Image (cartoon, grey):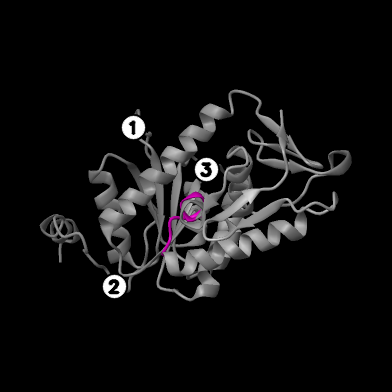
């Protein structure tokens, strides 16, 4: 079957789904010059049918796309600048969660997990590790496109903000929005996951206004509400454990709304 033709025929269907299991030897993509003005994506997927469909679909939507069938091929593709990675969790030569940690340590690329593994534990782990989104198969292509554009927009805003040093002090801590660091007493760094940092930065930036759980879901992941409400609560609980020292709660619960920063910020 011609996958490109099949995809185009069904492009108008909002719920186009892919779940076909195919077997074959993945080919390492040949690197090419990056088209000017196009953001570069890597599709890390061992099923050649799904991988080809995603590569074709996002290429047709004006992205520069490279396919990778394994962790090894992904590492090779990451040698060139990359803006976003679609990452399967189960790969033939490694674990997608571990690969995501490598990507986060060596690249500024966003990460969207695209996988069949749909347990709450997997979703939360993906968010804690590095994921901007966690999408389960079968895939809704238009939804995935919207999520990809959302991640890339947010990262573009972050890059613009990075041109100005932007630090905010609150209580015993200083959050550096440019370097994405949280410093405690005597400038000691406080280790935060990506999701924890994004959630805390949103609360700090709200100037004491309460933020709803639904809004915080958007901040950390844009996933299904049933899972993400619990995830937001879990992230807040972890932040509360990490932000101790002044004796005053840093994050307060606003009944019926969500959460707010309980300390006064100062520039």
Q: Secondary structure at mark 1?
A: loop
- Tell me residue 169's x, y (percent): 74, 35
Mark 1 / mark 2, whichever is N-terminal: 2
- Tell me residue 180's x, y (percent): 65, 40
Q: For the point 72% across and 58% down, which residue is it?
A: 240
How many other residues sit within 10 Å of disc 3, few (<14), some (14-19) or many (≥20)? few
| Residue 95 visible in rendering | no
How many other residues sit within 10 Å of disc 2, few (<14), some (14-19) or many (≥20)? few
Using the image as rendered, state which of residue 53 and residue 214 is in the foreground: 214
Q: For the point 61% across and 23% down, which residue is it?
A: 164
Do labels 3 and 1 touch, CB within 8 Å? Answer: no
Q: Secondary structure at mark 3?
A: loop
Q: For the point 37% across and 58% down, which residue is it?
A: 27
Residue denoted by label 2: 19
- First to last magenta residue range: 217-224
In the image, is 118 to the left or to the right of 259?
Answer: left
Mark 3 / mark 1, whichever is N-terminal: 1
Q: Residue furthest front?
A: 255
Do labels 1 and 2 touch, CB within 8 Å? Answer: no
Q: Nearer the viewer, mark 1 or mark 2?
A: 2
- Tell me residue 148's x, y (percent): 38, 48
Mark 2 / mark 3, whichever is N-terminal: 2
How many other residues sit within 10 Å of disc 1, few (<14), some (14-19) or many (≥20)? few
Q: For the point 26% across and 54% down, which residue is it?
A: 142
Q: Secondary structure at mark 2?
A: loop
Using the image as rendered, state which of residue 259 and residue 14 is in the foreground: 259
The image quarter containing residue 101 is bottom right
Q: Nearer the viewer, mark 2 or mark 3?
A: 2
Tag on residue 122? none
Residue denoted by label 3: 79
Tag on residue 35? 1
């Amino acid at each position: 079957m011609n996958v490109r033709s099949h995809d185009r025929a069904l492009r108008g269907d909002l719920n186009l789904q892919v779940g076909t299991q195919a077997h074959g030897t993945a080919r390492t993509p040949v690197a090419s010059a990056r088209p000017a003005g196009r953001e570069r994506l890597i599709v890390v997927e061992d099923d050649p049918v799904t991988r080809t469909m995603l590569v074709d679909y996002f290429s047709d939507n004006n992205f520069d796309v490279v396919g990778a069938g394994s962790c090894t091929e992904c590492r090779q593709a990451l040698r060139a600048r990359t803006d976003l990675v679609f990452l399967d969790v189960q790969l033939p030569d490694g674990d997608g969660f571990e690969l995501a940690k490598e990507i986060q340590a060596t690249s500024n690329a966003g990460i969207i997990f695209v996988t069949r593994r749909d347990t709450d534990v997997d979703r939360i782990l993906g968010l804690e590790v590095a994921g901007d989104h966690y999408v389960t198969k079968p895939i809704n292509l238009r939804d995935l496109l919207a999520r990809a554009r959302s991640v890339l927009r947010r990262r573009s805003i972050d890059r613009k903000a990075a041109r100005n040093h932007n630090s905010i002090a609150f209580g015993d801590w200083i959050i550096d929005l440019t370097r994405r660091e949280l410093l405690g007493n005597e400038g000691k760094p406080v280790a935060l996951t990506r999701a924890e940092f994004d959630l805390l930065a949103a609360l700090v930036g709200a100037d004491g206004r309460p933020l709803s759980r639904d809004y915080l879901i958007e901040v950390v992941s844009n996933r299904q509400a049933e899972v993400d409400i619990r995830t937001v609560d879990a992230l807040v609980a972890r932040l509360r454990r990490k932000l101790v020292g002044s004796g005053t709660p840093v994050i307060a619960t606003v009944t019926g709304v969500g959460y707010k920063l309980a300390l006064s910020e100062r520039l």
